[in-house]
Amino acid sequence: MPRPILATVHAPALRHNLARARAAAPDTRVWAVVKANAYGHGIERVFDALRGADGFALLDLAEAERLRALDWRGPILLLEGCFEPRDLELCSRLNLWHAVHCEEQIDWLSRHKTQTPHRVFLKMNSGMNRLGFRPEAFRAAWTRLNALPQVDEISLMTHFSDADGLRMGADGIAHQVAAFVQATHDLPGERSLCNSAATLRHALSVRLGDEASAQALAADWVRPGIAVYGSAPDHPSHRAADWGLQPTLTLSSRLIGLQQVAQGESVGYGSTYVAAAPLHVGVVACGYADGYPRHAPGSTEHGAPVLVNGVRTRLVGRVSMDMLAVDLTPVEAAHGPCALGDEVVLWGRSARGTVLPIDEVAQAAGTLSYELMCAVAPRVPFAVDHGET
Ligand SMILES: *Cc1c(COP(=O)(O)O)cnc(C)c1O
């Protein structure tokens, strides 16, 4: 028998979450962001559930090729554009739309030989200071692009640093929207501004006050990623369930060992957890080599949350490479003694219906759901659940 760890992708939840993103931005087309191998889920595993999107956005040209190999004929957007001139050949061949965020990418385009002009998304750095032209340089970049025979339609995009609204004292996105609107108000072309947080929190709310900002936010393409994968972009202000999102990824395993620990004894490497009272401990076939975060806390009575047989309990001791340990007290209080083979859910949905939000595990470990999803290790087998959620 293979080791019992398993990652399950929930196709109905992906469909549901995509519909939620659409409902949050009703008159807008939706890019399903599938970068990083669909946030660790696997592009081939999510494709069927997400093919109702208006397009797919990603970064990696090899991932774009995989989407075309799945026979996706619709739009694909390269969010970082090309990395070297010859990438443009693939864009021409596969009809990829691509971001243009720097002068060099315009130079490459100007020397590119193509039968079919490209659709490009000109990116503004409106305050994040990652990729894009600054507002004062944006128009010149647009004018340069617009003069190229290699370029067909030019769309305008930017990306927010604080759409989750969690930064103290920051106004979130208003200053970036204002910079974008001011620098682009008389430029033609479709707009794309919102990631998940902006889509859910801002696309419908007009608390920015002015009409131009509200319009720019609501136009023309939104780019939700994490929301499609069932996680709250602004956790812990909101939980995924508050946004009506369902978990799309379950990491599950089983108990492979049981220990009766006496008061004063420790559990695991470094003896970081010492039992204050006698404790029944379950040993789980999941460790950091599976992608579970090694820094998840287990040294206190407030260990990271885990489900055993659908009952919420906690990590005890350090996470090791292949195993971790959990307190079985609440589980046995609910259902009687545990046994080898009992179900453990590290995050996601238990066979008994209980949900452990990935956001809570991430928060306990001092990270984000994004990182946990992307970190599920290659040694973990995947399954796709096509059924009802
Ligand atoms: C990753 C990414 C997104 C999606 O972000 P989420 O927070 O996952 O919704 C949108 N736009 C760009 C440019 C990105 O890189």
Image: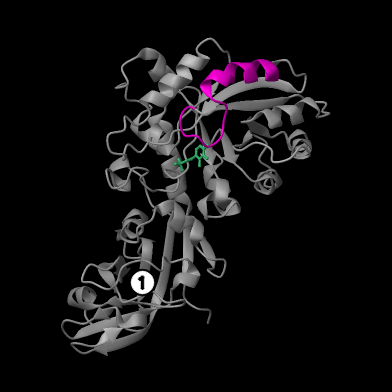
Residue 337 vertical placement versus 175 (above, below): below
Which amino acid type is shown beneath numbered disc 1?
Val
Q: Which residue is mark 1?
A: 344
Provide the secondary structure element on which disc 1 rests.
Answer: strand
Question: Which residue appears at 42% of the width and 17% of the height?
Answer: 215
Check the image and name the residue furthest to the top.
186
Residues packed near mark 1 inside 10 Å, few (<14), some (14 to 19) or many (20 plus): many
Colour mode?
A: one colour
Question: Which residue appears at 56% of the width and 35% of the height?
Answer: 131
Residue 177 vertical placement versus 348 (above, below): above
Q: Is residue 116 left or right of residue 319?
A: right
Residue 250 vertical placement versus 136 (above, below): below
Answer with the quarter of the image where residue 167 lies: top left
Answer with the quarter of the image where residue 207 lies: top left
Residue 35 vertical placement versus 4 (above, below): above
Image location of residue 321, percent across then percent down: 46, 76
What are the residue bounds of the magenta stretch?
A: 126-145
Q: Is residue 146 left or right of residue 219?
A: right
Question: Which residue appears at 76% of the width and 31% of the height?
Answer: 108
Image location of residue 299, percent across then percent down: 27, 73
Image location of residue 284, percent across then percent down: 38, 77
